[in-house]
C-alpha cells in the first residue's frame, strides 16, 4: 500500500532538516536554535490584526557583512475605503538574531498615509471614539514575556475634517529592558490626512 505524507508531516521533516543545518553551522548557539526552530513557521504570520500588510519593497540597511533589512509595507484601512498607510519596518540579520533574542525584532516603525481612491466610511460612528480605533497590529517577538507589538490607531479631528494615524508599540518589558527611555516603547509616528470637504463623514446622532 502506498502511503502519502500529509502537509504537516512534510513540514515537520523540513523543520528537522532546518534545525540540523542551523545547529551544524552554529554549534555555539545550539541551545538557542533547538527549542525555537519548530516555531519558525510562525514568522510568516507576524502581521496580524484588522488590516493585512502588503510588502512594497525591501532593501539592506545597517551591518558590515550581514546587513539588516528595511521593508516598506502598504496597509489599506479596511474601515475607510480610499486610504492607504505605508509603514517602514526593520528585520534583523541572522547573526544578530543568533547572538541575542532569535525571534525578536525592533518594535518601532514609521507611518505615512495617502488618499488612494474615493473616500467611503463603512461605519462613521466609530470616529466618535476619542481613544481611536486600532487598524493594524504586528507582533515583533514570540517571547510571551515581552509581547512586543507595533500598533496603529486611527483618530478623527472633526473640527478640521482630518484623519490621524498614530503608530506606537506596546510591551510587557520595562524601560531598562529596552534600552532606557530612548527605547522603541516611547516612540510614536503620526500621519495626518486632510479629507476633501465632499468626503466629510456625518457624525450626527439620529433622533
Image (cartoon, rainbow, N blue to C red):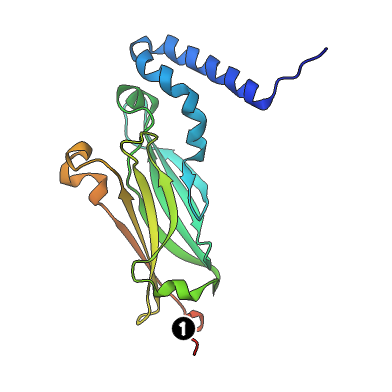
Seen at 33% across and 61% down, the residue is 190
Q: Name the residue under label 1.
A: 197
Residue ranking furthest to the bottom = 207
Give the answer, above or below, for where 149 lies relative to 28.
below
- On the image, the x and y values in percent for residue 203 come to 45, 82
Q: Nearer the viewer, residue 1 or 72?
A: 1
What is the total number of numbered labels drawn onto the structure image?
1
Q: Which of 173 and 78 is in front in this view?
A: 173
Residue 201 shown left or right of residue 145 in the figure? right
> Crowdedness of circle 1 by 10 Å Cα count: few (<14), some, many (20+)?
few
Residue 11 shown left or right of residue 176 in the figure? right
Q: Which of 147 and 29 is in front in this view?
A: 147
Seen at 52% across and 66% down, the residue is 79
Determine the secondary structure under disc 1: helix
- Quadrant in which the N terminus is drawn: top right
Seen at 37% across and 30% down, the residue is 67
Give the answer, above or below, for where 163 lies relative to 104.
below
Residue 190 shown left or right of residue 54 in the figure? left
Name the image quarter holding residue 28.
top left
- On the image, the x and y values in percent for residue 146 come to 31, 38
Q: Nearer the viewer, residue 11 or 52?
A: 11
Give the answer, above or below, for where 64 lies relative to 188.
above
Residue ranking furthest to the front = 207
- On the image, the x and y values in percent for residue 91 come to 39, 36
Give the answer, above or below, for where 19 lies relative to 78.
above
Residue ranking furthest to the right = 1
- On the image, the x and y values in percent for residue 18 come to 51, 18
Name the image quarter holding residue 165.
bottom left
Seen at 43% across and 12% down, the residue is 23
Amino acid at each position: 500500500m502506498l502511503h502519502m505524507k500529509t502537509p504537516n508531516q512534510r513540514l515537520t521533516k523540513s523543520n528537522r532538516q532546518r534545525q540540523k543545518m542551523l545547529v551544524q553551522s552554529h554549534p555555539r548557539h545550539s541551545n538557542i536554535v533547538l527549542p525555537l526552530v519548530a516555531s519558525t513557521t510562525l514568522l510568516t504570520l507576524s502581521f496580524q490584526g484588522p488590516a493585512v500588510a502588503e510588502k512594497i519593497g525591501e532593501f539592506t540597511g545597517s551591518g558590515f557583512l550581514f546587513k539588516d533589512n528595511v521593508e516598506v509595507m502598504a496597509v489599506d484601512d479596511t474601515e475607510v475605503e480610499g486610504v492607504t498607510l505605508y509603514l517602514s519596518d526593520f528585520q534583523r540579520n541572522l547573526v544578530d538574531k543568533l547572538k541575542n533574542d532569535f525571534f525578536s525584532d525592533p518594535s518601532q516603525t514609521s507611518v505615512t498615509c495617502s488618499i488612494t481612491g474615493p473616500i467611503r466610511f463603512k461605519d462613521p460612528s466609530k470616529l466618535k471614539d476619542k481613544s481611536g480605533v486600532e487598524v493594524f497590529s504586528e507582533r515583533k517577538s514570540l517571547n510571551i514575556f515581552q509581547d512586543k507589538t507595533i500598533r496603529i490607531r486611527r483618530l478623527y479631528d472633526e473640527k478640521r475634517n482630518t484623519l490621524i494615524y498614530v503608530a506606537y508599540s506596546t510591551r510587557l518589558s520595562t524601560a531598562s529592558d529596552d534600552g532606557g527611555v530612548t527605547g522603541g516603547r516611547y516612540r510614536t509616528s503620526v500621519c495626518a490626512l486632510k479629507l476633501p470637504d465632499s468626503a466629510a463623514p456625518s457624525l450626527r446622532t439620529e433622533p
